[in-house]
Amino acid sequence: MARRTILIIENDISNSKILQGVLSENNYEILEASNFKDGFSKLQYYKLDGIILDCLMEGKSGFDFLKKIRRDSKISKIPILILSKKTEDIDLILGLEIGADDYMYKPFNKRELIARLNSIYRRIEIDTQKNERILNLGNTKINLDSHMVYKNNIEIQLTPKEYKLLELFARNPSKIFTRDELLNKLWNDEVAYTSRTIDMHIRKLREKIEVDASTPLWIETIRGYGYRFKVY
């Protein structure tokens, strides 16, 4: 899994160092801001995977900062965990109603902090999968909406024709396609292409998605006929 980048908005130096330490130990990249203005500036320049926000700094409420983020369509989806010394339940409720993903009081337990962050990301992943059309093929995943393909959770780069070929196979498991069928579906009337074109694209696709392209698990050659996508 790629390292996530977290922005810490905290003006207590000792608390900021504790946060940096526990996040670094758990494979997070860290950015810092000591006030809301600096924090919002960093939001404009960095791609962030989350924010840990002290909701009271320099006499200003972090709730206004939170509202500002949730109203900005470019950054409104960033997960936000609030840390606060406040102990009134109304503050917790207000923070969650405005749009915080979670809320913790200071001093915080380090293991609980990481557990809460992990819980936030699990919820986001579940919600994302509900809203996206995903095809899971062993260690390979195809997002039919974004046309992105992942192998072992790492994006792999396919050409447009390689992607269309993989999607066609994945949508039709166990169906045997002749080379002519594949040419007609992917190249339509581009008559300059031949069955060797299909073989070349199959070979390159295997190199990208198979564990061992020389002994493919997914794309099976049906001798004298064409290809079939196996189902396990």
Image (cartoon, rainbow, N blue to C red):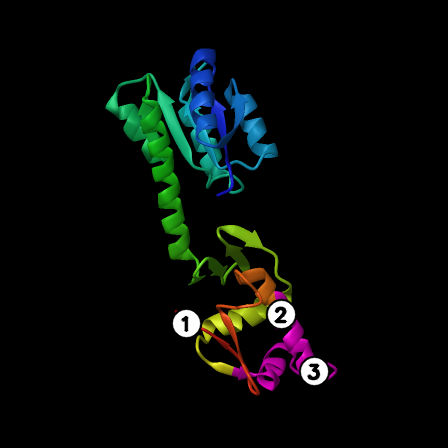
Q: Residue furthest right?
A: 192
Specify start and end residues of the magenta stretch as a single range: 177-204
Determine which quarter of the picture holds residue 82.
top left
- What label does residue 194 carry, if any? 3
Residue 60 is at least partly visible in this image: no
Going from N to C along the chain, the mark reached first, 3 or 1, is: 3
Q: CA distance from mark 1 to mark 2?
A: 19 Å
The image position of residue 8, as x and y in percent, is: 48, 24
Closest to the observer, 23 or 7: 23
Q: State left or right for residue 218 relative to residue 46.
A: left
Assess whether residue 78 is covered by the magenta stretch: no
Work out whether 12 lies above or below 20. above
Q: Amino acid at mark 2?
A: Arg
Pick the front one: 125 or 72: 125
Q: Secondary structure at mark 2?
A: helix
**Does the segment drawn in magenta span residue 188?**
yes
- Overall secondary structure of the magenta stretch? helix
Is residue 142 in sight in this rendering? yes
Calculate the distance from the C-alpha at mark 2 to the C-alpha at mark 3. 15 Å
Residue 79's quadrant in the figure? Answer: top left
Disc nearer the start of the sequence (1/2): 2
Figure check: 218 above or below 85: below
What residue sits 42% from the left and 33% below the top? 80
User: Residue 203: which numbered mark, if any?
Assistant: 2
Q: Which residue has dot 1 on it?
A: 231
Q: Residue placed at 34% from the left, 39% from the top?
A: 119
Measured from the top left, where is residue 68 in percent x and y?
A: 48, 32
Q: How many marks?
A: 3
Q: Amino acid at mark 3?
A: Thr
Q: Mark 1 is on which residue type? A: Val
